[in-house]
Structures are given as structure tokens and as C-alpha cells.
Image (spheres, rainbow, N blue to C red):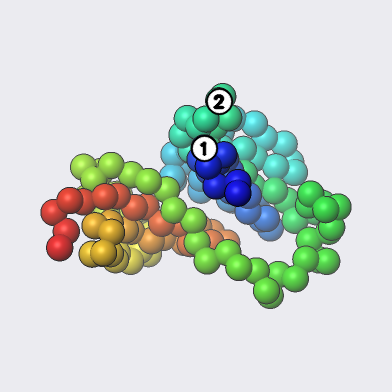
Amino acid sequence: MIKNKIKGLGEIILRVQDMELMKKFYSQTIGLELINASENYCFFKIADGYGGHHQTLALFAKSNLNAFNEKFGNIKTLNSTLHHFALEIDKKDYNYLLNFFEENNLEYITEVFEWTKWKSIFVKDPESNIVEFVCYDEGIG
């Protein structure tokens, strides 16, 4: 079993149509640190990871081949299983983010998950990928 060998989430990679628009959203709106970029990709640091590897969000141009040398058009995008991805936040920053999204006219929804004592804010990036900001709140339930 591999489970006990996994140390954390290494990276999430999104295929994007408009690299500059998406780069601006994740760097200027969300505030992630840009660590490497070209016209075909951008890598952002989410947080420190394990053993020197950052937890990373990467944006790849749709023209890039994937790890199996497949072009984007050959990937069954209608069957994609990506629902959303979540970024952990501190409970004390929850209301700050609500105010930030409101002040910047970014559509958002909230949800409380009583069974885990999590509360979340969901937003969409410019290409409609859903980004969740989630925190633990011991006062829930």
C-alpha cells in the first residue's frame, strides 16, 4: 500500500486557454507567489511542502503535451473528474476573504460542513475552475 508513503499534496495542474488572464488572477487576485513562468506554463507556490518540494498550483497552456504525450484535444475533457480544488486558510482569515470577494465583486458561495467542522468559501477563476477556501472551526455544530 502506498498510503503511508504520501507526505502531502505536491501540485495541482490546470490546463488554461488564456495564460495571462489566469496568471493575473492567481498572482494578483488570490496572491499566490509566482515561482516560475514561461509562455507555456506558470508555477505558483501555495505553501511549504515536504522535503523541499512546495505545494504548487501550475497552469499549463492547452498546447502542452501531458505526461503521456497526449495533446489536450486527445484528452476526454468531457469526462474530466475535476470538481474543484481547495486551499486551506486560517479561521481568523475567513471573514477577511468574504469581505475581499465582496469588495472585488467576485461571485462566491459559502457552505458549512458540520460533520468535519469546516466552513468554506467557493469562487470561480476566470476559466470557471472552482477554488475552495476552507478552514477548521471548532465552534461549528
Describe residue 31's horizontal placement relative to residue 99 as left or right. right
**Quadrant housing residue 38:** top right
Amino acid carrying label 1: it is: Lys
**Quadrant housing residue 77:** bottom right
Residue toward you, 36 or 70? 70
Describe residue 42's horizontal placement relative to residue 128 as left or right. right
Q: Earlier in the sequence, mark 2 or mark 1?
A: 1
Residue under circle 1?
Answer: 7
Residue toward you, 84 or 107? 84
Residue toward you, 104 or 49? 49
The x and y percentages for residue 19 are: 66, 49
Describe residue 23's horizontal placement relative to residue 38 as left or right. left
The x and y percentages for residue 32 are: 48, 38
* Residue extending farthest top: 52
Residue toward you, 99 or 36? 36
| Residue positioned 17% across, 51% down in the render | 138
- The quarter in which the C terminus is drawn is bottom left
**Quadrant housing residue 93:** top left
* Residue extending farthest bottom: 78
The x and y percentages for residue 128 are: 53, 65
Q: Is residue 92 above or below residue 119?
A: above
Q: Is residue 82 above or below residue 66?
A: below
Task: Say whether marks 2 and 1 touch (CB < 8 Å).
Answer: yes
Q: Could you give the CA–CA distance between mark 2 and mark 1, rounded to whole angstroms?
A: 9 Å
| Residue positioned 67% across, 74% down in the render | 79
Which mark, residue 51? 2
